[in-house]
Amino acid sequence: MPLSDGRAAYWRLRLQALALLMLAHRNAALRVFTSMLSRWPNDGYLLASRAHLHAQLGEHDLALADARTLTRAHPRRYAADWFNLAYLLANADCDEEAERAFHRAIELDPKLDRAWYGLGLLLVHARRFDEAAVALQRNAELQPMSPYGWYQLARVQLDRGQPEQARQIMRHLKEFEPGVAARLEREIGFAA
């Protein structure tokens, strides 16, 4: 059965934008997505794509506007939509709104490790170390071989006055990321 004229136009334009992206013509692809959004204003794929392009082009306010529109129009579409919004908000120093967006991402997908990590960093920035430790511990559980969560968790344990827990994390890091463990030892001034 043939596609309706509207569906055919949508897919033709979407493929055109993807081809432009493959050729690294971001601004041209952005114009295509913008044109498409005038016809399909709440399309989740188009909003997410344009937000991503705006962010890549350094147009953070425009990226944030599209990310907000996306999560309002499609609040249950993808946890990643909320993570992306949270990330943009955190970079814009909208910490309270970013925290809510991180929590929403985690609510939609409790295994979204990067949302736990982002939330942990945001809480560290707010000096809410006990809550940050919980978020970073969850990130480390979800990504046990990634040094980033463990590294931040060790630093938070020191901030919480838990040097022995920091040492345990450093010993763990030495098992699979000795370079990161050595850097951490230099930064905090004691060995595992």
Image (cartoon, rainbow, N blue to C red):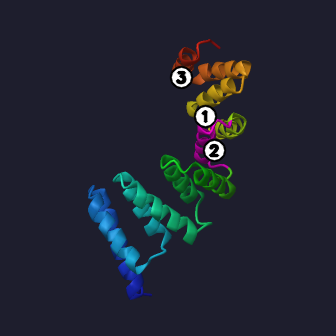
Q: Give how far apart the Cα atoms at labels 1 and 3 are.
A: 11 Å
Dots 1, 2 in contact, CB < 8 A: yes
Amino acid type at circle 2 is Trp
| The image quarter in which residue 27 lies | bottom left
Residue drawn at the location 54% of the way across and 15% of the way down: 186
Return the x and y of residue 40 as percentages of the image width and height. Answer: 43, 78
| 44 shown above or below 57 | below
Label 2 sits on residue = 116
Return the x and y of residue 15 as percentages of the image width and height. Answer: 34, 69
| The image quarter in which residue 149 lies | top right
Residue drawn at the location 26% of the way across and 57% of the way down: 23
In the rendering, which numbered label is found on residue 149? 1
Residue span colored magenta: 111-128
In the rendering, which numbered label is found on residue 180? 3
Dots 2, 3 in contact, CB < 8 A: no
Q: Give how far apart the Cα atoms at labels 2 and 3 are.
A: 20 Å
Q: Secondary structure at mark 3?
A: helix
- Main secondary structure type of the part rendered in magenta: helix
Amino acid type at circle 3 is Val
Residue drawn at the location 62% of the way across and 36% of the way down: 124
Label 1 crowd (10 A; few <14 / some 14-19 / many >=20): many
Q: Quadrant of the C terminus?
A: top right
